[in-house]
Amino acid sequence: MYKKILITGGCGFIGSNLAIFLKEKKFNVYSLDNLSREGSKLNLERLKKKKITNFKIDIKNYKDISKLPKFDFIIDCSALVEAKVKKENITNVLKTNFLGTNNLLLKCTNDKTRFIFLSTSRVYSIKKINQIINNKKIIKKKIFLNKNHSINENFSTAPPLSFYGLSKKFSEDLILEYSYSYNLKFLINRFGVVSGPWQFGKVEQGFLSLWLWKHLIKSNIKYIGFGGYGNQCRDILHVYDVCEIIHKQIKKFNKIQNNTFNIGGGLKNVLSLKDVTLLSEKLTKNKIKIGKIAKSDKSDIPFYISNNNKIFKFYNWKPKRSILEIASDTYNWQIENFKKLKNFMN
């Protein structure tokens, strides 16, 4: 059994949950995080309580990374997650997400360390996704999606992808090059939307936690893009389901490696922003004003559904937790940590 694991971005949402989960499974877990993001210090407190050491290192700094001890696995959860990247931030996103991955790959190949990379559904072509349905329909009424709309690993990754998506696709290709040239052993996981406790709601990726929080504090919010009607859809996966599939991947790594998987909530866990509003109202018992901005950003997509057929075939894995469970767990966590969260969620 592989015991020593480094999780980069270990004080982030997914990274901290995964670190604690694996620690409780008796792995020797370490975190790497420069603590630059809001909320990371709260997650650092959680790791300290579990006696998980964090290396305060910027992923762009290879000199410091190279000095770290050898690990059995590096699990890369670190990234600047910005679906809509401002022009002045493009360079930083590429440096962090692409060159940061390169630094980890250098470390892995030097130490013969196995590598699990958390990628994103945003590596798929915006134009090709837009061609699946008639975008004009989403403006006025809800889309009724089915299994034929789900996206598998063979879907086009031709640009445009968004700058964030492009940075992750660059990293994926870099992993393949290291595997070819230096025999790197790897897995790539393309996750859709992930939510759950300890997600500090952000517009870019944490819309469920953001919606719940705004309803909880009775603050206004807006439907943005596609006419401003809130009909755009995503599938959502509980962060604990993420932890469980990665645990399976570690245990079966000798048998299953050098592969890419889509992992998400799937068709059963799809909901629109309108649905999120109704769910938030049900849980919080509050109604808030929902504004609208009709114009869509070019980096946005009308829907996304993960096709989980491949991950099920290889690992007999399906998401366990429903949309209601994800939302309830997130909301209950917000209630329990209300005072701490006020400085981070607004």
Image (spheres, rainbow, N blue to C red):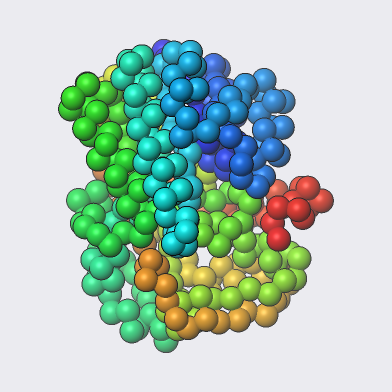
For image coordinates 44% across by 19% down, the residue present is 66
59 over 79 or under it: above or below: above
For image coordinates 58% across by 58% down, the residue present is 202
Hey, which residue is sitting farthest bottom in the picture? 140
Q: In the picture provided, is 115 more to the left or to the right than 288?
A: left
Q: Residue 128, image x and y in percent?
A: 23, 66
For image coordinates 51% across by 60% down, the residue present is 204
Quarter of the image for residue 117 reads top left
Q: In the picture provided, is 215 more to the left or to the right than 228?
A: right
Q: Residue 121, image x and y in percent?
A: 35, 53
Q: Residue 276, image x and y in percent?
A: 56, 67
Residue 100 visible? The answer is yes
Q: In the picture provided, is 102 more to the left or to the right than 148?
A: right
For image coordinates 38% across by 21% down, the residue present is 107
266 over 109 or under it: above or below: below
Hey, which residue is sitting farthest right in the picture? 339
